[in-house]
Structures are given as C-alpha cells and as structure tokens.
C-alpha cells in the first residue's frame, strides 16, 4: 500500500479531516436541532381559525366534556371536530348577536361547514390512531397538554418520532384508568406510579415489544 501522505502533509491532512468532521457533526447537529425546534415542529404556535374558539372558556370554565365536541375518539383514528349544529345547541340562544360568532351563524344559514384549520398535523407517512391510545390508558393530556387552560388551541408537545418513542419504549408510567382519559391536571405521581404502571400495563394487556417496530407507525 503506497504511503498517501508524507509526515508533514499527514499533519495537515489530519487537521483538515478533523476540521471537516467538526463541520459535518456540527452541521448535522444544527440541522437536527432546527428540525426539532418548535419553529419546525409547530409546537406552541397558534393557528388562525374562522372563530376564536376557547377551550379555556368552554372546557375549563363551563366544564363541557371533550366527547361532546370530539365525538369519535373512542371508535376511530380521528377524534373529530364539532359541526355547526353542535355550537348552535347553545349559541342559538347564547351570544346570538356577538360579532365573533357571525361565521357560525353564516355557516348555519348557508349550510356550509366551518373550516377549522389543523393545529396538529403529522406527515402522511405516519400512521396514528386515537382509538388505539384512549382505549389503552393514554389520556388526551399526555399528548395535548392542558387544553382546558388554552384560550386559543396550541400544540403542546413536539410530536416528533423521538417523542412518540419515548412513551412507546416505556408506556407504563404514562397510563391512567379508563375513567380518567379526558381528565385534565391528572396527577401522575412518582411514588404510586411503579406499582400502578405494572398493574395498568396488565389491565390494558399492552405488549410493548411491537410498539417500537417501524411498521407500527409507518405502514
Ligand atoms: C364546545 C366544543 C369543544 C369541547 C368541549 C372541546 N373541544 Fe377541542 N376543539 C373544538 C373546536 C371547535 C376545535 C377547532 C378549533 C381549535 O383548534 O381551537 C377544537 C380543537 C381541538 C384540538 C386541536 C385539533 C387540531 O386541529 O389539531 C385538540 C387537541 C382538542 N380540541 C382537544 C380537546 C380536548 C382534550 C377536550 C376536552 C378536555 C376538548 N378539546 C373539548 C371544540 C371543543
Ligand atoms: C354547552 C353550551 C355551549 C356550546 C356547545 C358552545 N358554546 Fe360557545 N359559549 C358558551 C357560553 C355559555 C359562552 C359564554 C357566554 C358568556 O361569557 O357570558 C360561550 C362563548 C363563546 C364565544 C365568545 C368568546 C369566549 O369564548 O368567551 C365564542 C367565540 C364561542 N362561544 C364559540 C363557540 C363555538 C365555535 C362552538 C362550537 C364549536 C361553541 N361555542 C359551542 C356555551 C357554549
Ligand atoms: C398518543 C397521543 C394522543 C392522544 C392520547 C390524544 N391525541 Fe389527539 N391528536 C394526536 C395527534 C398526533 C394528532 C394529529 C393526527 C394527525 O395529524 O394525523 C391529534 C389530533 C387531534 C384532533 C384533530 C382532529 C383529528 O382527529 O385528527 C383532535 C380534535 C384531538 N386530537 C383531540 C383529542 C382528544 C379529545 C383526546 C382525548 C380523548 C386526544 N386527542 C388524545 C395525539 C393524541
Ligand atoms: C404517552 C404515551 C404514548 C405516546 C406519546 C404515543 N403513544 Fe402510541 N401507543 C401508546 C400505547 C399505550 C399504545 C397501545 C399499545 C397496545 O395496543 O398494546 C400505543 C399504540 C400505538 C399504535 C398502534 C395502533 C395499532 O392498532 O396497532 C400506533 C400506530 C401508535 N401508537 C402511534 C403513535 C404515534 C405516531 C405517536 C406520536 C405522534 C404516538 N403513538 C405517541 C402510547 C403512546
Ligand atoms: C411510535 C411511532 C413511530 C415509530 C415506532 C417509528 N417512527 Fe419514524 N416517525 C414517526 C413520526 C411521528 C415521524 C414524523 C415526525 C418526525 O419527523 O420526527 C417519523 C419520521 C420518520 C422518518 C422521517 C424523518 C425525517 O426527518 O424526515 C423516517 C426516515 C422514519 N421515521 C423512520 C423510522 C424507522 C426506520 C423506524 C423503525 C426503526 C421508525 N421510523 C419507527 C413515528 C414513528
């Protein structure tokens, strides 16, 4: 094997290789950080909506249950969004002249659905299902945060693959009893969690082996 570098150029070459490595690693890290920065994942951003709907008001203060408006989370991949009639059960009598509700009244009069913009939106190559989670002990709060405190809806979690996997590797401590799925401010207490994690994994019959396989989320 012929010598590639003389001792002198060897030093320079090492330096160049080292510099290149720093650039590559640094550059990759920067790209990765950019990829998972809230700007890129859409975390925390507020999205423009036809009506400035407030969960803080309707859920936090009025106490309306999630299922009243998101009717399909237990039996479908999609949680679903409320139609105009759902708003009108109350707003045909309450705040009937409010300007902010004009688009709702128009939607009813013209029989055109309100077009809510998506706050959460996974890429098409990712498979996700609400049913699979809420029927297996994962509460809305684990993925959507304190919705009951949001004047405008925000994406509370990064929704990156790493974030999904953090739970899929060790779901036990994130689980809760069936009656608590929509509860906000649920205390996942550290002390109780060890025993209850094992208990809940068994109750829901969760098999963690399959949960980190690529085909679970990419099919
Ligand atoms: C009175 C009706 C109503 C109730 C009750 C309600 N929501 Fe909503 N929700 C809406 C409407 C309307 C939107 C669409 C506008 C928006 O994003 O704010 C929405 C949007 C959302 C979104 C964002 C959807 C997206 O585009 O990604 C989440 C998450 C959500 N709701 C969770 C909840 C949870 C959790 C509860 C119960 C704690 C709840 N909602 C209760 C009406 C309701
Ligand atoms: C169960 C009854 C009920 C339903 C269903 C309901 N609302 Fe309301 N909404 C209220 C009440 C009560 C108020 C507050 C009136 C007040 O502050 O005096 C309100 C207030 C509002 C306001 C005024 C701003 C605010 O939040 O303070 C908007 C906008 C609004 N609702 C939009 C909607 C939309 C859109 C829907 C359907 C997705 C909806 N509401 C469904 C009861 C309801
Ligand atoms: C394991 C995490 C997780 C849990 C638990 C969860 N969600 Fe979601 N939710 C998501 C993700 C991720 C999306 C975006 C889905 C997409 O883009 O395909 C979403 C989207 C939504 C939407 C937008 C409409 C739709 O169906 O895509 C609503 C509304 C919603 N969630 C409400 C809820 C409610 C209410 C609960 C509890 C009963 C809940 N979610 C539980 C992760 C979760
Ligand atoms: C807080 C915990 C948690 C988070 C976060 C979470 N999951 Fe899950 N996921 C679970 C549990 C628990 C199950 C049920 C496993 C079982 O059925 O044995 C599950 C099951 C699934 C399934 C299996 C559905 C089926 O029918 O086989 C898919 C797909 C999935 N999750 C996708 C995702 C994606 C994509 C994300 C991120 C956007 C995510 N999950 C985030 C806990 C979580
Ligand atoms: C629990 C769900 C889940 C599992 C399991 C999973 N992924 Fe993903 N994956 C996601 C989500 C969500 C995204 C989109 C968000 C993101 O890019 O972080 C994604 C994105 C990707 C991307 C695109 C990354 C990019 O930067 O554009 C690739 C490639 C990928 N996954 C490969 C894999 C491979 C290979 C496996 C198996 C070793 C795997 N995934 C297992 C949820 C999952």
Image (cartoon, helix red, strand yellow):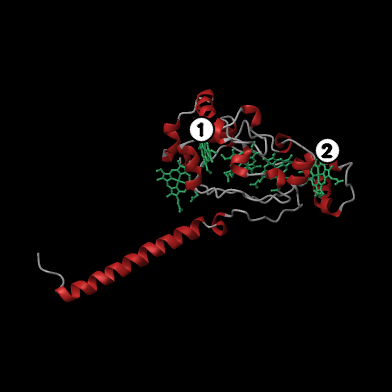
Quadrant, the N terminus? bottom left
The answer to whether 139 is drawn above or below residue 20 in the figure is: above
Mark 1 vs 2, N-terminal side = 2
Where's residue 155, x and y in %?
62, 50
Task: State left or right for residue 157 relative to residue 216.
Answer: right
Image coords of residue 36 (percent x, y): 50, 55
Classed neighbour count for the residue bearing mark 1: other residues with Cα under 10 Å, few (<14), some (14–19), many (≥20): many
Q: Could you tell me which residue is drawn at 62 percent across and 36 percent down?
A: 187
**How far from the left and from the top, in percent, is residue 92?**
87, 42
Q: Identify the residue shown where x is 32% and y is 65%.
A: 21
Residue 23, compared with residue 147, is above or below; it is below
The secondary structure type at the circle numbered 1 is: helix
Q: How many marks?
A: 2
Q: Which residue is mark 2?
A: 89
> Quick one: 121 or 175, which is closer to the camera?
175
Q: Residue at x 67, y 51 (%)?
A: 117
Give residue 193's mark: none
Do callouts 1 and 2 mark residues in contact (Cβ within 8 Å)?
no
Judge by depth and name the residue closer to the eye, 127 or 25.
Answer: 25
Residue 146 vs 137, above or below: the answer is: below
Residue designated by label 1: 172
| Image coords of residue 10 (percent x, y) | 19, 72
Q: Is residue 214 left or right of residue 179?
A: left
Work out which residue is located at the far top of the displayed protein and give it: 203
Label 2 CB-ligand 2 distance < 8 A? yes
Which SS class for mark 2? helix
User: Where's the C terminus, which quadrant?
Assistant: top left
């Amino acid at each position: 094997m012929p010598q590639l570098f003389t001792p002198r150029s060897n030093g320079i070459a090492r330096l160049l290789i080292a510099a290149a490595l720093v650039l590559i690693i640094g550059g990759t890290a920067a790209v990765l950080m950019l990829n998972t920065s809230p700007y890129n994942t859409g975390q925390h951003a507020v999205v423009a909506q036809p009506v400035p709907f407030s969960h803080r008001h309707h859920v936090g203060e009025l106490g309306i249950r999630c299922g009243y408006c998101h009717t399909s989370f237990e039996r479908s991949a999609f949680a679903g969004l409320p139609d105009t009639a759902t708003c009108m059960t109350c707003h045909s009598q309450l705040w009937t002249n409010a300007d902010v509700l004009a688009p709702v009244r128009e939607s009813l009069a013209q029989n055109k659905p309100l077009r809510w913009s998506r706050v959460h939106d996974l890429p098409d190559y990712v498979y996700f299902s609400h049913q699979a989670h809420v029927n297996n002990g994962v509460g809305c709060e684990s993925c959507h945060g304190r919705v009951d405190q949001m004047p405008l809806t925000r994406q509370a979690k990064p929704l990156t693959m790493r974030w999904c996997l953090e739970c899929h590797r060790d779901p036990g401590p994130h689980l809760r009893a069936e009656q608590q799925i929509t509860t906000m401010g649920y205390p996942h207490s550290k002390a109780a969690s060890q025993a209850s994690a094992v208990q809940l994994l068994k109750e829901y019959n969760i098999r963690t082996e399959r949960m980190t396989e690529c085909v679970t989320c990419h099919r």
